[in-house]
Image (spheres, rainbow, N blue to C red):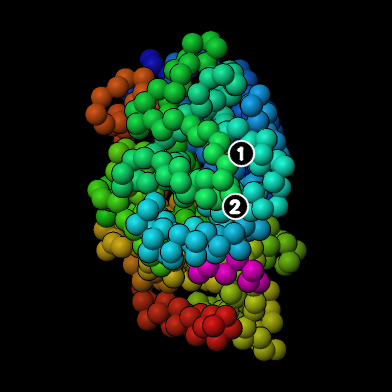
Amino acid sequence: MTVVAGVDSSTQSCKLVVCDADTGTVLRQRQIAHPEGTEVAPALWWDALRAACDRMMRDVEAIAVAGQQHGLVALDGNGMPVRDALLWNDTRSAEAAEQLVAELGGPQAWADAVGSVPLAAHTVAKLRWFADHEPELADRTARVLLPHDYLTWQLRGGDPDSEPTTDRGEASGTGYWSPATGHYRPDLLTMALRGRSPGLPTVLEPAGVAGHTPGGRVIAAGTGDNAAAALGLGIEDGDVVVSLGTSGTIFTRSPSPSADPSGAVNGFADATGAFLPLVCTLNAARVLEATAVLLGTDLSGLEVLAAQSPAGADGLTLLPYLAGERTPNLPNATGSLHGLRAATMRPHHLARAAIEGMLCNIAEAFDHLPTTPRRILLIGGASRSRLIAHAAATIFGRTVTVPNPSEYVALGAARQAAWALRGGPRPPRWPIPQATEFHTATPATGAAIRARYAQIRDSYYN
């Protein structure tokens, strides 16, 4: 048996799965927590990855890392971070993003250049904030990497004289690499950094080999978390994935690049050589977790409470902008609760409103995707709730397919590792995950919930 490993280095944790390279069967897995916050020392990710690998790699021949996108890892000439990494969900760079959009000539110019319009999450906006607020540290920066790039480089030994690598999926989220042309835009990097031009990682093809571990294992190119999830799920053109993690991401596979001047859709590349139009919200599972804490329960208890409230929560509506928001672009917004009456000020109604508010926000982001979905796949921790899956089908007004729970990001990375090991024009064929379908019995109810949500959002934030 040939054995490969895949890593999901996310905001919350490092997950490792070890798989049979021929069938994708998961042989063993481990998870190590990451520290909380929107700034993290990159060495802590490396510590978590090493801990996850401990005694798990005995027969592994190849490994790939999938990581959270956009995070800024700035290294000096000795390969040491000059500051803690700024994560994708750090919104201090919102004003910097607006500056960059104006300087290049508006949203259309950015969409044409790199397929996406900068928002606070994008690396290019973080670089502008960095240059303006920490110029001495920016002066010391010799290389700019993403979290996955840093971990792949560390797996190779972290030699400061060796060239770091990345892949199309990760590079497409920076704001200075074009999925349409397959090339960096060094002029945009220099513009963001006020004239500085640090080194960037080499962009590998999807089946490329980044190098080898000191023990001789093949290290695949790796990719971003969403591209890895698409690979783990084996999605085809027309499939739309809704991932309910800390944030909410909605993406689809496309044979051609996209360029949305509204800024809602990110024109990313995927991990197969195709493209991955993607919309992201900052608020998904965090909404449920915060509501559970408020109600003095956990996520299971929140579901039990929500089941006692009817669809629509008796008129109670939550705008779930607890961390600002990316889609819609409201980085400084706060959450708000509407429809409070004596009858609605009940724990079960608030629990239902939290779930529906999260899903309405996701559904509005979903509407921006330039595709008519063939199938909607719901993944992520929150998708394991049957109540949430039923509510999603109601609010989306479509059948929702929930694959059996699995670590699809890490699984996609493992599939990429098998591809790098074996070669060939396409990734190895692994079985399509088994899934459960949830249908909407009351589309009019979902439409009414969304209409009330939209009316409140427009009156409150416009």
Instruction: Determine whether, in the image, residue 280 is placed left or right of residue 444.
Output: right
Q: Alpha-carbon neighbours of circle 1 within 10 Å: few (<14), some, or many (≥20)?
A: many
The percent position of residue 41, horizontal first and vertical second, equals 70, 37
Q: Amino acid at mark 2?
A: Arg
> Which dot, 1 or 2, sits closer to the camera?
2
The percent position of residue 69, horizontal first and vertical second, equals 52, 45
N-terminal label among 1 and 2:
1
Q: Which picture quadrant has residue 412?
A: top left
Which secondary structure, mark 1?
strand
Range of magenta residues: 328-334
Is residue 439 in sight in this rendering? Answer: no
**The N terminus is located in which quarter?**
top left
The answer to whether 281 is drawn above or below residue 32 in the figure is: below
Tell me how far mark 1 sits from mark 2, CA to CA.
14 Å
- For the stretch drawn in magenta, the main secondary structure is loop
Which residue in the rendered view is the most extreme toward the top?
215
Mark carried by residue 128: 2
Instruction: Determine whether, in the image, residue 245 is placed left or right of residue 419.
Output: right
Residue wearing tag 1? 73
